[in-house]
Amino acid sequence: MEERYATEEQQIEAIKKFWKENGLAIFIGAAIGIGGLVGWNQYKASEIEAQEAASANYAQAVAQLEQEGGFGAVSDYIANNSDQSYADLAAMQLANKAIASQDFAEAAKQLKIVVDNATHLPLKNLASIRLARVQKQQGDFDAALTTLQGVTENQFPGVALELQGDIHQAAGNIEAARQAYVQALDAEGASAIVQVKLDNLAVAGDAQ
């Protein structure tokens, strides 16, 4: 229950008594609070600085790709920064470079790094689709289909189904390819050429 005081002098004396009994604790609490705020601001500043440094290191590493020995330098960057999302982006760049050189084994290696380590779901799914394409190119159709299973339903559904059809067709599974293409037509993201692929399957079936 709140105490009532008859005079201002009584109120002042009560305040003095309160601060005498509790002032140190309040001061320490305020100091901790202010210190926590300063610490948080320092943490955010250091976090921003770290992100800027990581971005600069990534840009520098990727810029080396066009230089002699750049492929190895970027590989080293990925190995030394496996806990950073920039390492995943660098691995995607290396995979593109390897595909352009038709080094599909190296491309699969780099894309597998992203598939296994990426925490950003769209990037992980994109890497899975590209890895499945590379595995199809290598003739490893079972591995390609297994990789596609890791693509979530709400990410690139049409693209994944179209690729699934391509893999089945390359493996000679015409009926499975047809079913995948039909599903792709109703899914988001499939290319306009899916209908052509489906029509070609029908022509091929009539020719047999």
Image (cartoon, helix red, strand yellow):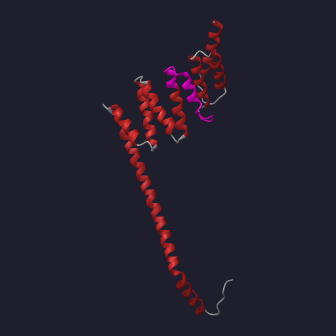
Query: Which is more toward the observer, 59 or 165?
Result: 165
Does the magenta run of residues contain 145?
yes
Check the image and name the residue furthest to the right: 1
Image quadrant of residue 39? bottom left
Q: Quadrant of the C terminus?
A: top right
The residue drawn where x is 55% and y is 22% is 141
Image quadrant of residue 70? top left
The residue drawn where x is 49% and y is 70% is 32
Check the image and name the residue furthest to the left: 68
Q: How many marks?
A: 0
Does the magenta run of residues contain 130?
no
Q: Position of residue 186 (x, y in %)?
A: 67, 27
Magenta region: which residues?
A: 133-155
Q: Position of residue 137 (x, y in %)?
A: 49, 21
Q: Is residue 144 above or below residue 47?
A: above
Image quadrant of residue 59? top left
Q: Is residue 89 above or below residue 49?
A: above
Q: Relative to residue 139, is residue 74 drawn left or right?
A: left
Query: Which is more toward the observer, 198 or 36?
Result: 36
The residue drawn where x is 44% and y is 25% is 105
Q: Quadrant of the N terminus?
A: bottom right
Q: Is residue 197 above or below residue 118?
A: above
Q: Position of residue 38 (x, y in %)?
A: 45, 65
Q: Relative to residue 147, is residue 46 drawn left or right?
A: left
The residue drawn where x is 40% and y is 46% is 54
Query: Which is more toward the observer, 105 or 193?
Result: 105
